[in-house]
Amino acid sequence: MALERSAKGVGLFGWGAKRRSSASPPSTGGPLIYAIGDIHGRLDLLEDLLGQIARDMAATPSDEKPVLVFLGDYVDRGAYSRGVIECAMRICALENVEVRALKGNHEQAMLAFLANPEFGPTWLQNGGAATLVSYGVAAPQARTTSDLWTETRDALERAMPPGHLAFLQNLELCVEYGDYIFVHAGLRPGVPIERQTEQDMLWIRNEFLEERRPFSKMVVHGHTPEPEPYAGPVRMGLDTGAYATGVLTAARLFGQDRRFIQASAHGDPLAVKAS
Protein backbone atom coordinates (compact mmCIF):
# COMPACT_ATOMS: atom_id res chain seq x y z
CA MET A 1 0.00 0.00 0.00
CA ALA A 2 1.05 3.64 -0.31
CA LEU A 3 -0.23 7.07 0.58
CA GLU A 4 -0.16 10.74 -0.20
CA ARG A 5 -2.23 12.73 2.26
CA SER A 6 -4.72 15.04 0.63
CA ALA A 7 -5.71 18.37 2.05
CA LYS A 8 -8.03 18.33 5.03
CA GLY A 9 -11.54 19.59 4.67
CA VAL A 10 -15.17 18.62 4.33
CA GLY A 11 -18.03 19.85 2.21
CA LEU A 12 -21.44 21.02 3.30
CA PHE A 13 -23.91 18.46 4.50
CA GLY A 14 -26.99 18.23 6.65
CA TRP A 15 -30.39 19.81 6.62
CA GLY A 16 -28.91 22.92 5.02
CA ALA A 17 -28.07 20.80 1.97
CA LYS A 18 -30.11 18.55 -0.28
CA ARG A 19 -30.85 15.26 1.47
CA ARG A 20 -29.73 12.04 -0.13
CA SER A 21 -32.59 9.80 -1.24
CA SER A 22 -32.52 6.60 0.82
CA ALA A 23 -33.82 4.77 -2.28
CA SER A 24 -30.70 5.68 -4.26
CA PRO A 25 -27.67 3.48 -3.44
CA PRO A 26 -24.74 5.61 -2.25
CA SER A 27 -21.61 5.69 -4.38
CA THR A 28 -18.00 6.51 -3.65
CA GLY A 29 -17.93 8.57 -6.82
CA GLY A 30 -14.95 6.61 -8.12
CA PRO A 31 -12.30 5.58 -5.57
CA LEU A 32 -12.03 2.25 -3.80
CA ILE A 33 -12.43 3.07 -0.08
CA TYR A 34 -11.70 1.03 3.04
CA ALA A 35 -12.94 2.38 6.39
CA ILE A 36 -11.67 0.72 9.58
CA GLY A 37 -13.67 0.76 12.80
CA ASP A 38 -12.52 1.23 16.39
CA ILE A 39 -9.22 -0.61 17.03
CA HIS A 40 -8.65 0.04 20.75
CA GLY A 41 -5.15 -1.35 21.02
CA ARG A 42 -5.80 -4.58 19.07
CA LEU A 43 -2.65 -4.46 16.97
CA ASP A 44 -2.98 -8.14 16.11
CA LEU A 45 -6.38 -7.62 14.49
CA LEU A 46 -5.28 -4.42 12.75
CA GLU A 47 -2.30 -6.12 11.12
CA ASP A 48 -4.52 -9.01 10.00
CA LEU A 49 -7.12 -6.64 8.58
CA LEU A 50 -4.53 -4.49 6.78
CA GLY A 51 -3.14 -7.65 5.18
CA GLN A 52 -6.59 -8.56 3.88
CA ILE A 53 -7.10 -5.02 2.61
CA ALA A 54 -3.74 -5.03 0.83
CA ARG A 55 -4.60 -8.30 -0.95
CA ASP A 56 -8.05 -7.04 -1.92
CA MET A 57 -6.59 -3.77 -3.14
CA ALA A 58 -4.05 -5.58 -5.32
CA ALA A 59 -6.83 -7.68 -6.86
CA THR A 60 -9.12 -4.72 -7.61
CA PRO A 61 -8.33 -2.67 -10.73
CA SER A 62 -8.98 1.02 -10.19
CA ASP A 63 -8.11 4.19 -12.08
CA GLU A 64 -7.93 6.20 -8.86
CA LYS A 65 -5.72 5.95 -5.81
CA PRO A 66 -7.41 3.82 -3.13
CA VAL A 67 -8.45 5.49 0.11
CA LEU A 68 -8.03 4.16 3.65
CA VAL A 69 -10.01 5.85 6.44
CA PHE A 70 -9.35 5.17 10.12
CA LEU A 71 -12.49 6.04 12.10
CA GLY A 72 -10.63 6.76 15.36
CA ASP A 73 -10.23 5.13 18.77
CA TYR A 74 -6.78 3.69 18.18
CA VAL A 75 -5.98 3.69 21.91
CA ASP A 76 -7.26 2.47 25.31
CA ARG A 77 -8.70 -0.82 26.57
CA GLY A 78 -6.62 -3.13 24.36
CA ALA A 79 -3.02 -3.97 25.23
CA TYR A 80 -1.10 -2.43 22.31
CA SER A 81 -2.18 1.19 21.91
CA ARG A 82 1.40 2.33 21.27
CA GLY A 83 1.81 -0.29 18.55
CA VAL A 84 -1.46 0.69 16.90
CA ILE A 85 -0.37 4.34 16.71
CA GLU A 86 2.98 3.30 15.25
CA CYS A 87 1.24 1.08 12.69
CA ALA A 88 -1.17 3.87 11.70
CA MET A 89 1.75 6.28 11.32
CA ARG A 90 3.56 3.82 9.03
CA ILE A 91 0.45 3.50 6.85
CA CYS A 92 0.14 7.29 6.70
CA ALA A 93 3.69 7.46 5.32
CA LEU A 94 2.87 5.28 2.30
CA GLU A 95 2.47 6.75 -1.16
CA ASN A 96 0.09 4.53 -3.14
CA VAL A 97 -2.87 4.98 -0.76
CA GLU A 98 -4.59 8.15 0.40
CA VAL A 99 -4.96 7.76 4.17
CA ARG A 100 -7.34 9.82 6.30
CA ALA A 101 -6.91 9.31 10.03
CA LEU A 102 -9.88 10.50 12.08
CA LYS A 103 -10.01 11.43 15.75
CA GLY A 104 -12.02 9.41 18.26
CA ASN A 105 -13.22 10.30 21.73
CA HIS A 106 -10.43 8.19 23.24
CA GLU A 107 -7.77 10.23 21.45
CA GLN A 108 -9.53 13.33 22.75
CA ALA A 109 -9.28 11.88 26.27
CA MET A 110 -5.60 11.03 25.91
CA LEU A 111 -4.84 14.54 24.68
CA ALA A 112 -6.88 15.99 27.55
CA PHE A 113 -4.71 14.06 30.03
CA LEU A 114 -1.50 15.23 28.34
CA ALA A 115 -2.76 18.81 28.60
CA ASN A 116 -4.12 18.49 32.15
CA PRO A 117 -3.04 15.65 34.49
CA GLU A 118 -6.16 16.19 36.61
CA PHE A 119 -8.10 14.49 33.80
CA GLY A 120 -6.27 11.26 34.66
CA PRO A 121 -8.98 9.58 36.76
CA THR A 122 -11.58 10.13 34.04
CA TRP A 123 -9.24 8.78 31.38
CA LEU A 124 -8.49 5.68 33.43
CA GLN A 125 -12.20 5.00 33.90
CA ASN A 126 -12.45 4.83 30.11
CA GLY A 127 -9.55 2.46 29.46
CA GLY A 128 -6.55 4.77 29.66
CA ALA A 129 -4.60 2.47 31.96
CA ALA A 130 -3.96 0.07 29.08
CA THR A 131 -2.50 2.91 27.02
CA LEU A 132 -0.16 3.97 29.82
CA VAL A 133 1.08 0.40 30.25
CA SER A 134 1.66 0.06 26.50
CA TYR A 135 4.13 2.96 26.81
CA GLY A 136 5.80 1.36 29.83
CA VAL A 137 4.22 3.77 32.32
CA ALA A 138 2.63 2.44 35.50
CA ALA A 139 -1.03 3.38 35.85
CA PRO A 140 -1.87 4.97 39.23
CA GLN A 141 -4.98 4.20 41.20
CA ALA A 142 -7.83 6.49 40.21
CA ARG A 143 -7.88 8.00 43.70
CA THR A 144 -4.39 9.43 44.08
CA THR A 145 -2.62 12.76 44.53
CA SER A 146 -2.42 15.43 41.86
CA ASP A 147 1.37 15.30 42.10
CA LEU A 148 1.35 11.61 41.13
CA TRP A 149 -0.92 12.32 38.19
CA THR A 150 1.49 15.04 37.05
CA GLU A 151 4.40 12.61 37.36
CA THR A 152 2.46 10.06 35.33
CA ARG A 153 1.68 12.59 32.61
CA ASP A 154 5.33 13.63 32.47
CA ALA A 155 6.43 9.98 32.27
CA LEU A 156 4.03 9.39 29.38
CA GLU A 157 5.38 12.41 27.51
CA ARG A 158 8.93 11.09 27.93
CA ALA A 159 7.93 7.60 26.80
CA MET A 160 6.07 8.66 23.66
CA PRO A 161 8.30 8.36 20.57
CA PRO A 162 8.74 11.43 18.38
CA GLY A 163 5.75 12.00 16.19
CA HIS A 164 3.12 10.28 18.35
CA LEU A 165 1.84 13.52 19.86
CA ALA A 166 1.81 15.22 16.46
CA PHE A 167 -0.13 12.29 15.02
CA LEU A 168 -2.78 12.64 17.74
CA GLN A 169 -2.96 16.41 17.40
CA ASN A 170 -3.43 16.30 13.61
CA LEU A 171 -6.26 13.77 13.45
CA GLU A 172 -9.24 14.92 11.39
CA LEU A 173 -12.85 15.12 12.56
CA CYS A 174 -14.59 14.00 9.36
CA VAL A 175 -13.99 13.50 5.65
CA GLU A 176 -16.23 13.08 2.58
CA TYR A 177 -16.00 11.01 -0.58
CA GLY A 178 -18.83 10.78 -3.08
CA ASP A 179 -22.09 10.03 -1.27
CA TYR A 180 -20.30 9.10 1.98
CA ILE A 181 -19.22 11.07 5.01
CA PHE A 182 -16.90 9.44 7.56
CA VAL A 183 -16.90 10.47 11.22
CA HIS A 184 -16.09 8.78 14.51
CA ALA A 185 -19.38 8.86 16.43
CA GLY A 186 -21.97 10.43 14.15
CA LEU A 187 -23.67 13.74 13.46
CA ARG A 188 -26.40 15.72 15.13
CA PRO A 189 -29.60 15.65 13.05
CA GLY A 190 -30.73 19.02 11.74
CA VAL A 191 -27.30 20.65 12.01
CA PRO A 192 -25.22 21.42 8.88
CA ILE A 193 -21.65 20.20 8.89
CA GLU A 194 -20.08 23.61 9.41
CA ARG A 195 -22.02 23.90 12.67
CA GLN A 196 -21.42 20.37 13.96
CA THR A 197 -19.43 20.40 17.20
CA GLU A 198 -16.38 18.29 17.95
CA GLN A 199 -18.21 17.00 21.03
CA ASP A 200 -21.03 15.58 18.89
CA MET A 201 -18.76 14.16 16.20
CA LEU A 202 -16.74 12.31 18.85
CA TRP A 203 -19.43 11.38 21.40
CA ILE A 204 -23.00 11.45 20.03
CA ARG A 205 -25.06 8.29 20.30
CA ASN A 206 -28.84 8.06 20.69
CA GLU A 207 -29.89 11.19 18.82
CA PHE A 208 -27.86 10.05 15.82
CA LEU A 209 -28.49 6.30 16.03
CA GLU A 210 -32.27 6.78 16.31
CA GLU A 211 -32.51 9.21 13.37
CA ARG A 212 -34.53 7.75 10.48
CA ARG A 213 -34.40 10.67 8.03
CA PRO A 214 -31.51 10.38 5.56
CA PHE A 215 -28.68 12.87 5.82
CA SER A 216 -27.35 14.38 2.61
CA LYS A 217 -24.72 11.60 2.67
CA MET A 218 -24.46 8.09 4.05
CA VAL A 219 -22.72 8.35 7.44
CA VAL A 220 -19.96 5.80 8.10
CA HIS A 221 -19.02 5.73 11.78
CA GLY A 222 -17.67 3.78 14.74
CA HIS A 223 -17.93 4.60 18.48
CA THR A 224 -21.00 2.53 19.38
CA PRO A 225 -20.19 -1.21 19.62
CA GLU A 226 -22.67 -3.57 18.00
CA PRO A 227 -22.56 -7.39 17.74
CA GLU A 228 -22.44 -7.16 13.94
CA PRO A 229 -21.50 -4.34 11.57
CA TYR A 230 -24.58 -2.38 10.60
CA ALA A 231 -25.59 -1.16 7.13
CA GLY A 232 -28.88 0.72 6.87
CA PRO A 233 -30.40 3.53 4.80
CA VAL A 234 -28.94 6.31 6.97
CA ARG A 235 -25.69 5.00 8.41
CA MET A 236 -23.05 2.26 8.46
CA GLY A 237 -21.71 1.31 11.90
CA LEU A 238 -18.30 -0.40 12.00
CA ASP A 239 -17.50 -0.70 15.72
CA THR A 240 -17.71 -4.41 16.58
CA GLY A 241 -15.99 -4.00 19.96
CA ALA A 242 -12.61 -5.38 18.86
CA TYR A 243 -10.97 -5.11 22.27
CA ALA A 244 -13.65 -7.35 23.84
CA THR A 245 -14.97 -9.45 20.95
CA GLY A 246 -11.77 -10.11 19.03
CA VAL A 247 -13.44 -8.92 15.79
CA LEU A 248 -12.26 -5.82 13.92
CA THR A 249 -14.38 -4.60 11.01
CA ALA A 250 -13.75 -2.57 7.88
CA ALA A 251 -16.16 -1.44 5.18
CA ARG A 252 -15.08 -1.93 1.58
CA LEU A 253 -16.79 0.64 -0.63
CA PHE A 254 -16.32 0.80 -4.40
CA GLY A 255 -18.80 2.62 -6.62
CA GLN A 256 -22.19 1.43 -5.35
CA ASP A 257 -20.82 -1.85 -4.01
CA ARG A 258 -20.41 -2.10 -0.24
CA ARG A 259 -19.33 -5.03 1.89
CA PHE A 260 -17.54 -5.76 5.13
CA ILE A 261 -14.10 -7.29 5.72
CA GLN A 262 -13.32 -8.59 9.21
CA ALA A 263 -10.33 -9.88 11.12
CA SER A 264 -11.20 -12.34 13.86
CA ALA A 265 -9.11 -13.66 16.74
CA HIS A 266 -11.38 -16.71 16.90
CA GLY A 267 -10.57 -18.37 13.61
CA ASP A 268 -10.37 -17.67 9.91
CA PRO A 269 -10.88 -14.06 8.73
CA LEU A 270 -14.49 -13.26 7.91
CA ALA A 271 -15.82 -11.64 4.76
CA VAL A 272 -19.42 -10.44 5.02
CA LYS A 273 -21.63 -8.90 2.33
CA ALA A 274 -23.29 -5.68 3.43
CA SER A 275 -27.07 -5.72 3.07
Image (tube, rainbow, N blue to C red):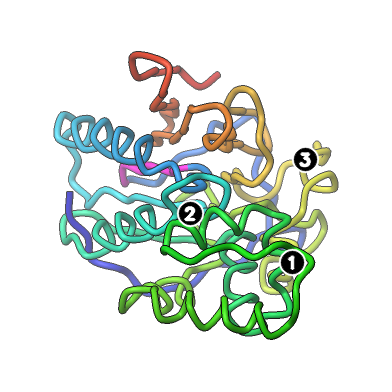
Residue at image position (31%, 60%) is 86
In the rendered image, the vertical position of residue 3 relative to residue 257, given as above or below? below
Question: Mark 3 to mark 1: distance in Å?
Answer: 29 Å
Total marks shown come to 3
| Along the viewing direction, whichever of 215 and 171 lies nearer the viewer | 171
- Residue stretch in magenta: 31-36
Residue at the disc numbered 1: 121
How crowded pointer 2 is (Cα within 10 Å; few <14, some 14-19, many 20+) is rated as many
| Along the viewing direction, whichever of 13 and 210 lies nearer the viewer | 210
Residue at the disc numbered 2: 74
Q: Earlier in the sequence, mark 2 or mark 3?
A: 2
Q: The disc labelled 3 sits on which kind of residue? A: Leu
How crowded pointer 3 is (Cα within 10 Å; few <14, some 14-19, many 20+) is rated as some
Residue at image position (48%, 27%) is 247
Q: Position of residue 8 (x, y in %)?
A: 43, 73
Q: Earlier in the sequence, mark 1 or mark 2?
A: 2
In the rendered image, the vertical position of residue 260 relative to residue 192, given as above or below? above
Q: The disc labelled 1 sits on which kind of residue? A: Pro
| 257 on left or right of 236 | left
| Along the viewing direction, whichever of 232 and 104 lies nearer the viewer | 104
Q: The disc labelled 2 sits on which kind of residue? A: Tyr
Question: Mark 1 to mark 2: distance in Å?
Answer: 20 Å
Evaluate if marks 1 and 2 touch, with contact meaning CB atoms under 8 Å apart: no
- The numbered mark at residue 209 is 3
Q: Secondary structure at mark 1?
A: helix
Q: Position of residue 125 (x, y in %)?
A: 73, 56
